[in-house]
Image (tube, rainbow, N blue to C red):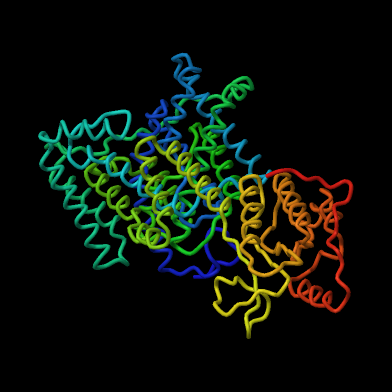
């Protein structure tokens, strides 16, 4: 089977892929239906609103999104934020509550589209690989803890991870034996199928076997919990008033930030594993359209789901066709299959989630980070700990903050080099890298391997002078190789001018080489090129060396003195 010029599937789409997408979509639907109904209750609306939010969101994202695997729909964090935002505004009126939740989704979606058009998806670049690895590990643990009640029959409650674990520990002596047995058997069968026959849709087979067993043995009459009756009716809803749209605007921004952050973290994590890319600005547009669709269908704000995405992958999905299969299954279930779904055991549902969660923990990724740089491993562990301790959004923000501080620390203290010539190699190279490198007599060449800005400006000036101080021979020219200095700010230019003035006071001519044209424009605007003089500005280090050697054939000239407009400041 071939599909060309289609955003849903690659240009070559096989029957085997269709089989995997169908199995993955049905597995996602079986898991999603009770899950999104629970999220709707968490958001404060009727449970069936979760289904009507999920169907349009998944269908719209399947067409507009750039991730082949991401599952979009109701999600626990945005559901909790919806409840926190709408409860104070609704005044206890269920009808108004439903109107406001729909308005919240529409406004959040509108903001997302505007952000995408403004190309604000660049914020996703703050999400580094260590954060992705740690984030998914933290989410996986939260997913597992959230299923402990389903797989043991122990009532679990609490407002956070630790309260849930404490509640589970207290109730563990009263675990329901048949529930534990069915969950254990389901989980073991899932891993066995994934190991021995990975091409088969293991989750779908396990769902079918468990549901058939419950129906055949009437296990629900012996205390085994099942999904139960699903309503098909639509919740009451009227178009939101303009004043409501204004009132929900501030929380809509928060919902958008959380939803987009979660979407990009999950989408990029799965894209990295499965060899495709996602585009942040188009993701904003797709997420915005999905939220507007969910609001228009009388739902509430949506985001991405790591658990459903992992479940789709585990079921064999490879394109967004699986989302359309899941949407079809949701609609078909509401119309025809509600009695069959009612017999689906929650123990197997919990086992499916735990199976997907375990596969999210990338132990090889943690080992890779540890072997590369300890600070990268620490960032991943911090992201995981932040998600577990402070909840998802705060954990992400903490990890991003620490990641930026780590980057700032490394850029503020970068590598620098004294350059020399190496026999047999063209150009000039770090003398520390080559034992046989020799500096050019009378010429001191220095390179600072970072953009210059406020955080490293003082460090740059200090290290350049310190390197010059360690020079053993007489120095006539100081040449700053600027090939790595691609950006400057005013603080850096002040430091660069101070360095030039100090070197000139020592009777040494100051020059620059390898400056980009954009950077030369900044130096012109500041007045540095005038202070340096055009005769000491070189396109390459080779040109600087040639000019220096040519100078020895002519009578020596005194170093250029500062023009009247140049400044000199103390360190």
Front residue of 245 and 166: 166
Task: Say above or below: 437 vs 137.
Answer: below
Q: In which quarter of the image is residue 561?
A: bottom right
- On the image, the x and y values in percent for residue 456 come to 62, 49
Q: Quadrant of residue 485?
A: bottom right
Tell me which residue sits at (60%, 25%) in the image: 245
- On the image, the x and y values in percent for residue 294 come to 52, 37
Tell me which residue sits at (74%, 66%) in the image: 514
- On the image, the x and y values in percent for residue 15 come to 43, 68
Residue reaching furthest to the top: 91
Image quadrant containing the C terminus: top right
- Horizontally, is 217 left or right of 209 in the view? left
Tell me which residue sits at (70%, 75%) in the image: 440
Front residue of 426 and 153: 426
Q: Quadrant of residue 253?
A: top right
Tell me which residue sits at (35%, 45%) in the image: 138
Residue reaching furthest to the bottom: 424
- Horizontally, is 328 left or right of 146 in the view? right
- On the image, the x and y values in percent for residue 204 come to 30, 55
């Amino acid at each position: 089977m071939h599909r060309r010029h289609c955003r849903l599937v690659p240009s070559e789409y096989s029957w085997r892929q269709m089989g995997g997408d169908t199995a993955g979509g049905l597995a996602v639907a079986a898991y999603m239906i009770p899950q999104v109904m629970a999220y709707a209750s968490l958001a404060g609306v009727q449970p069936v609103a979760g289904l009507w939010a999920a169907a349009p969101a998944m269908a719209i994202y399947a067409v507009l999104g750039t991730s082949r695997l991401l599952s979009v729909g109701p999600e626990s964090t945005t559901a909790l934020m919806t409840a926190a935002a709408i409860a104070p505004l609704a005044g206890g009126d269920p009808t108004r509550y439903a109107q406001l939740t729909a308005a919240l989704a529409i406004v959040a979606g509108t903001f997302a589209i505007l952000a995408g058009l403004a190309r604000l998806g660049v914020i996703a670049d703050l999400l580094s690989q260590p954060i992705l690895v740690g984030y998914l590990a933290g989410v996986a643990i939260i997913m597992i803890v959230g299923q402990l009640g389903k797989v043991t029959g122990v009532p679990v409650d609490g407002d956070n991870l630790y309260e849930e674990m404490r509640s589970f520990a207290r109730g563990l002596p009263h675990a329901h034996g048949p529930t534990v047995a069915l969950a254990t058997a389901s989980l073991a069968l899932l891993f066995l199928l994934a190991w021995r026959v990975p091409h088969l849709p293991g989750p779908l087979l396990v769902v079918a076997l468990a549901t058939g067993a419950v129906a055949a043995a009437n296990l629900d009459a012996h205390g085994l919990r099942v999904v139960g009756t699903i309503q098909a009716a639509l919740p009451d809803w009227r178009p939101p008033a303009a004043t409501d749209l204004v009132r929900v605007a501030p929380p809509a921004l928060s919902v958008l930030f959380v939803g987009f952050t979660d979407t990009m973290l999950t989408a990029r994590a799965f894209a990295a594993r499965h060899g495709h890319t996602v585009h942040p600005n188009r993701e904003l547009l797709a997420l915005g359209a999905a939220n507007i669709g969910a609001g228009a269908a009388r739902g509430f704000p949506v985001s991405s789901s790591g658990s459903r995405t992992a479940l789709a992958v585990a079921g064999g999905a490879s394109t967004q066709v699986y989302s359309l299969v899941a949407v079809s299954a949701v609609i078909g279930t509401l119309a025809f299959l509600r009695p069959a779904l009612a017999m689906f055991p929650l123990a197997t549902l919990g086992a499916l989630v735990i199976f997907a969660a375990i596969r999210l923990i990338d132990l090889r990724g943690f080992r890779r980070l540890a072997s590369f740089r300890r600070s990268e491993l620490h960032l991943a562990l911090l992201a995981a700990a932040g998600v577990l301790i402070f909840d998802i959004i705060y954990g992400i923000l903490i990890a991003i903050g620490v990641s930026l501080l780590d980057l700032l620390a490394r850029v503020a203290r970068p590598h620098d080099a004294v350059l020399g010539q190496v026999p047999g190699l063209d150009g000039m190279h770090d003398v520390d890298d080559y034992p046989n490198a020799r500096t050019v007599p009378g010429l001191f060449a220095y390179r600072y391997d970072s953009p210059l800005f406020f955080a490293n400006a003082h460090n740059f000036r200090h290290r350049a002078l310190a390197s010059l101080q360690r020079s053993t021979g007489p120095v006539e020219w100081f040449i700053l190789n600027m090939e790595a200095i691609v950006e400057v700010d005013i603080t850096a230019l002040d430091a660069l001018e101070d360095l030039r003035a100090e070197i000139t006071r020592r009777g040494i001519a100051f020059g620059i080489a390898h400056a980009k044209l954009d950077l030369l424009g900044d130096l012109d605007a500041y007045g540095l090129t005038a202070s340096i003089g055009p005769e000491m500005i070189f396109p390459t280090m080779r040109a600087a060396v040639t000019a220096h050697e040519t100078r020895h054939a002519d009578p020596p000239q005194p170093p250029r003195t500062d023009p009247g407009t140049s400044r000199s400041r103390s360190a």
